[in-house]
Amino acid sequence: MRHSGVDLHKANFVVCFLAAQGKPRVLTFSLDAEGQAACCRHLRTEDEVAVEVGQNTYFFDEQICTRGKRVVLVDTHRFALLSRSKKKTDRDDATLLARFLKMGWLPTVSVPDKRVRQLRQLFHARESLVEMPTKLKNRGQGALTRNGVAAIVFGSIFAAPQKISISRPMSRVVFSNC
């Protein structure tokens, strides 16, 4: 059985194939259908593949698992050895993942099913949208303050049309519900 480590990026990925004997073989593939097919031609059905969890890891996992390969997702927070290494290259990261997979020392993450992943994406999008009005209000107040305008806000400026009066220099802006 061979062990493989994958350093996954947005456009490509680097794979280190580590056989039981011999030196590691490192190859780079594009993250499109052609690159994944080329990678799968190098993989055997008994191979194990270790990938750090990131934004496109689940997509990669689905593509490789459909071809019968066992993919292990690595918890990046508990496997901080990669982020602390002095020699930070894609080749070294992939090799390190393959070596630790071979020894069985990788902290893994379970793969939730597709429905759970979709729900998580929806909840994350909702949370971002809920936080957006506060962030926009704070940016507006910051811009006014940087330009010498003191802003006083009564109530929520997003609740109803506002009455705003500005006089310069270093004047006050009063936001109040109409």
Image (cartoon, helix red, strand yellow):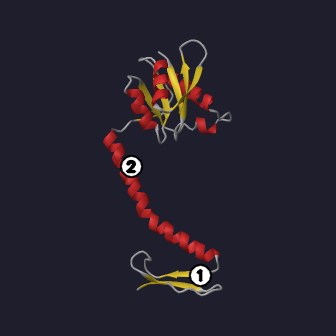
Which residue is under mark 2?
121
* Residue at 61 percent of width and 32 percent of height: 90
Which numbered disc flags the more N-terminal residue, 1 or 2?
A: 2
Q: Position of residue 89 (x, y in %)?
A: 64, 33
Q: Is residue 4 left or right of residue 146?
A: left
Q: Residues within 10 Å of mark 1 (few under 14, many from 20)?
A: some
* Residue at 51 percent of width and 25 percent of height: 101
Q: Is residue 13 left or right of residue 177?
A: right
Looking at the picture, tell me which residue is in the foreground, 3 or 84.
Answer: 3
Q: Is residue 32 visible?
A: yes
Which residue is under mark 1?
150
Q: Position of residue 51 (x, y in %)?
A: 49, 32
Determine the secondary structure under disc 1.
strand
User: What amino acid type is highlighted by mark number 2?
Assistant: Gln
Report the quarter where the C terminus lies. Answer: bottom left
Determine the secondary structure under disc 2.
helix
